[in-house]
Image (cartoon, rainbow, N blue to C red):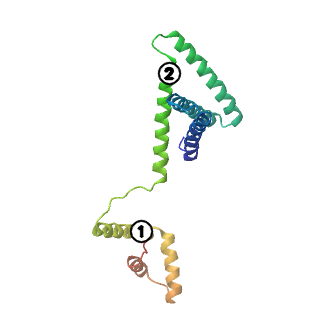
Amino acid sequence: MQNYGTKILKILLFIGVFAYLQYYDLNRGAHSIASVTEGLMIASAIYLIVSLFGIVLSLSRNYLIAIIGTGVLALLLAFKLDEVIAATSWLTEGRVTAALGALAGVCLIRDILLVKTSLTPPRTAREDTSSATTDKEDANTKMRNDIKSNPQSVLNLSNMLEKRWGRKPSYDEVMDYIDHLVIPDED
């Protein structure tokens, strides 16, 4: 899922849910470390459910099926997870919540880094001017060779030169013209 719009939407949803829960706790005077932890866990659960919705939607390509499938899968996973917690002695609800929160945190950080790298231009190392000049000359030579190897380009150039000069140019004149052709910089 390389759609950066969905990643941005999931990030904003996570931040929005967390911010709303903290605002709600502040307004009723119940703000504490526990409320911050609860807010993070609820926002993480919503983040994971939205990610699950994206997976089901990409598989089914139908919004109604994705909504119903996500609801069914979320409930099924919650009840099965409850059964797994009850069947083991070392696995507690706190550990499962922490593990799911850590998973959501890792996915959230990965999404943030992917969006950040897609929005920032790639860094280029500063090169000395002689290297840059050589690269431009190589690109110009390649462009000239491409023009020479394309018969339609050579024919079009020959027709243009015939109109400009008033006579039909020879093959050598066309090739010489291409060799001395000034190729403008694309900057």
Q: Position of residue 140 (x, y in %)?
A: 38, 70
Badge 1: residue crowd in 10 Å (few <14, some 14–19, many ≥20):
some
The residue that mark 2 highlights is 96
Q: Position of residue 66 (x, y in %)?
A: 66, 33
What is the tally of numbered marks visible in this picture?
Answer: 2
Q: Which residue lies furthest to the front in this view?
A: 29
Nearer-the-camera pick, 151 or 110: 110
Q: Which amino acid does the dot numbered 2 rest on?
A: Val
In which image quadrant can residue 38 be found?
top right
Q: Where is residue 157 in the image (x, y as percent from the top left)?
A: 49, 77
Nearer-the-camera pick, 95 or 69: 95
Q: From the viewer's perspective, tell me whether residue 28 is left or right of residue 162.
A: right
| Residue at the (48%, 50%) spot, across then down | 118
In which image quadrant can residue 145 be found?
bottom left
Q: Which mark is residue 98?
A: none
Q: In this view, does 180 lie above or below 132?
A: below
Query: In terms of secondary structure, where does tag 1 sit?
Result: helix
Give yes or no for contact between labels 1 and 2 (Cβ–Cβ under 8 Å): no
What whole-number distance in Å separates the C-alpha atoms at marks 1 and 2? 60 Å
The residue that mark 1 highlights is 143
Q: Where is residue 124 in the image (x, y as percent from the top left)?
A: 36, 58
